[in-house]
Amino acid sequence: MITIVDTGGIDDSLGLPLPIETTLPSVPKFHRAFGLDEDQLLAKSGGSFTLGRAMSNWTSSPAPSFHPYSETGANLGPVGFHHLVARKRSGGEAVNLANYSVAALCAQSGRFARPPADLRSVLSTMGYGLHLETSSYRSFLKEVALAGGVRAIGGSVADAELSARNQIRAVRLESGEKIVGDLFLDCSGPSRVLISKLPDAQFEDWSNLLPCNRFAASIRDAAEAPLAYTHIDATSDGWQSFASTQNVSAQADVYCGDADGQSTPFVSGRMVRSWIGNCVAIGGAAAVIDPIASTQLHLAASSIARFLKLLPDNISATAEANEYNRQFAEELENARDYAALHYRRNGKFGVPFWDSCRRKNALLRLAHKVALYESTGRLARLVRRAGYYAAALRCDGRCDRRPASVRFHGSSAKHNVERGRNAATASCLSGTVNESECMSDSGPIRHIVIVGGGTAGWMAAAALSRMQANGVTKITLVESDEIGIVGVGEATIPPIKMLGINENEFVARTQGSFKLGIEFDGLERDGSKYLHPFGAYGSDINGVKFHQIWLRLRSLGFKAPLADLNLGSVAAKYGAFDRPSPDRRSITLTIDYAFHFDAGLYARFLREYSEARGVVRREGKIIRVEQREPDGFVGAVETERGERIEGDLFIDCSGFRGLLIEDTLKTGYEDWTHWLPCDRALAVPSARTEPLLPYTRSTARSAGWQWRIPLQHRTGNGYVYCSEFERRRGGGDIA
Amino acid sequence: MCIAASLSDDEAAATLLDNLDGEALAEPRPLRFVTGRRKQAWNKNVVSLGLASGFMEPLESTSIHMVQAGISKLLALFPDRRFAAHERDEYNRLTALQWEQTRDFLICHYKLNNRKGPFWERCAHMQIPESLTRKLELFRDRGRLFRYEDELFSDASWTAVMMGQGLMPSGHDPLADTLNPDEIGHMVGKMAALFDGAARAMPPHAEFIAQNCAGGRV
């Protein structure tokens, strides 16, 4: 049973009481996931669509920039679109990003359509958020909740009654009424009427990163049709937003200032833990983030979704609470950093408030992200919405420092090799990157030297060979025939990419076979056996994960083993294999596979591939490594034949010893023996007498485990063990 | 790398050779290692790949993947001659994360075992990283699984190994109770029949290879 206590008053449950909530594209998705019909929602609440944010006066330039809720341009292979733009701009060409965004183009001309499901349509790259008049949106949700059986009562919370273990047992209202419950959601906004009563409650102030502390808003009837975007204008001490719906338009002012009688104060920050015991704070009760990036409703909706995923069935669910808090912290810090970026990277030079924001020290993770972008235009992968970041990072109006090093094959790349030296060194001097490792020498890597020619070395050579297309970079691989291929196994897991190599050719050339998973024999206990398959189990139903459905059925006496619900496992049982069908509706799509192959043949295959692409092979054992003064970088290696090979970048594939990384640079090693105790292995090929199985087998032995890998021409065998226990068994070490 | 054989290697060789599919085609080749990882996979102007960057046993065939993941990160963060520290730092941060996630998955195989004998019993009682403890606790209780940033192994992989190693969740997600048990029972039964039919329609593995990618005699 669910009871909601409606405390009335100004609705600041999301943080700041904005008259119109502007949302990110995630919110329409949440609506769909929660089963809310969008057309019905917009019809009843008068809401409208937003295709992005127009940012005005954030730079000295009078033209606003647009941050669209759609992809901008398209990546070319592995090269991100923002790199392509940077390259064009470095050639002096003016590029208006808005011309490469469907959402920006639609927003400018006041058009809107929902993106089609057909992924081949360029319109499918478009996303949209919503403009929702907060009060009518709330009424709509209330109607849905009441129809779903939720009980609502009005009243103010006077007190919470705690148990001996500091769980909330009940809330008492001003009227004297007492409401008992198992689980309490605090949606009371910054007043935090429940969670603040718990002894563990702790607020963390983020106003050093998000300096605005005053809020004012006004709302009036709409004079015209709603704009399909949100307008955000920088002011002398903060920002103003303008948004409109079908019926109303609203202005919000967020700024940094003293009490003035016309505005409401607020503090950006969060509860360090928003799920404590049996109380979960949602929305403004959990965190208040300056809403410059329209994150308020997103954070509340995603908190609810996360809470549903971790919904406990008893009130002492500490594992769930810890997990919730960890995930929420991550999301919240990303949202905070993104909002903080607007202040830290503003282009309003000469305005005292904004100048002070630029000078402020950002948190480490933000500084790191900005440094990475400033020098290379690269975005840390931590951030999913790379496009939004790219847009925001540019809001100071400055150009990306230089394009990425990844280049295209072909002659057209040549004229782009020269980079602006000034720009490159400027980022060294800016203070964000000032380590001694910033050398005066700039320009592309001229020579890559790969030390060691095992599987690792030749894989690196094959994959890096494309770098030579810039006309500057050369690659040399040094290998000694003395060092054979050891260690690197003869099997893979699915994500192996084939460098554009035909898969059938690869399997044929390496005497390979297909791998649906790994069978573990006796690893749990003697006689037990199971397959770890690569593909998924069953399929999710109504958003419930398949293994959860299976667990439920199992609790009801359902007998089918989980392995029967995995196509790879069933095929492995029959010793059969087939690739997934190209038909998107086929159930064979749930198959995922990897390969078994002969590592020696694979290295030979990669060597041919690399040498055909210009990689030079040198034979000889390395006897000396030269380090440069004063930075200690490796400058050259010398072979026993007296050949000296200089390089800018060295790839150490010399095996466990680590000729460069450890012997020379003394990098240090983190020992995991206490967790993974095996310390020796023996490998031997044998004739294959049994049928060609489509999986690897691992069998437990008394001091380790043994592998068996089926290849076309033989079987690969190996034993991995812990010498301490093998010795005990054998009775002493005479080495 | 080859080191004089000790008695324990001889014992181990006997264990291995006693359990071969067919006749051995060479002498067993020994390898000694210390599981772990290089503290910085990229140091100054040296990037280490393969065994030079660390070693985890091939229980889940991760070695080649780690090499490949290293190369693709290097391509994504390819330096110029300034060797900016933040490119190296990002490479090392992502690499450390990936090694730790893989390490946890491997430890899980050892930690969750019910075998007899001193080696396996010690593994079952060892301390494990906090990140893995959290994962096991969430699963033990109600089968909860979360896949974190860039994690190599899927929910299905964790499910297979945790259940396979005897960790059956004691409950399930309360959301599963919102589904009609007869309907889902029927759907899941149908699914199993479909899978069985699809698998029976596939060619035997050897036949598939003979038709598409036979390597010929060597």
Image (cartoon, coloured by chain):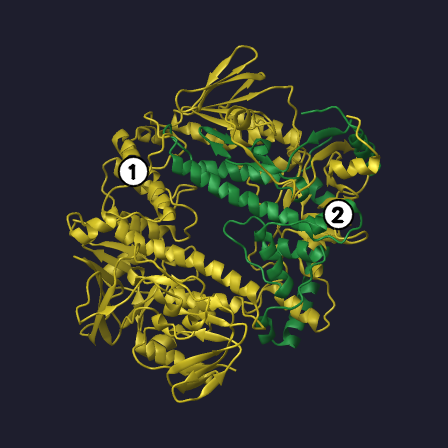
Residue A449 can be seen, yes or no? yes
Q: Name the residue under label 2.
A: B120
Residue A149 can be seen, yes or no? no
| Mark 2: secondary structure | helix
> What percent of the width, then of the height, locates residue A405?
38, 34
| Mark 1: secondary structure | loop
Chain with colour green in the figure: B
> What percent of the width, then of the height, locates residue A441?
33, 25
| Above or below, A140 relative to B105 | below
Residue in front for this viewpoint, B203 or A522: A522
Q: Residues within 10 Å of mark 1 (few under 14, many from 20)?
A: few
Q: Name the tint of chain A in the rendering.
A: yellow
The C terminus of chain A is located in which quarter? top right
Task: State the residue at coordinates (72%, 58%).
Answer: B166
Residue in front for this viewpoint, A389 or A40: A389
Residue in front for this viewpoint, A534 or A557: A557
Q: In this view, does A204 lie to the left or right of A569?
A: left
Chain assignment, label 1: A
Residue A333, numbered label:
none
> What percent of the width, then of the height, locates residue A429?
28, 34
Task: State the residue at coordinates (52%, 61%).
Answer: A323
> What percent of the width, then of the height, locates residue A632?
43, 24
Amino acid on which the number 1 mark rests in the picture:
Gly
Q: Name the residue under label 1.
A: A431
Task: State the residue at coordinates (41%, 85%).
Answer: A173
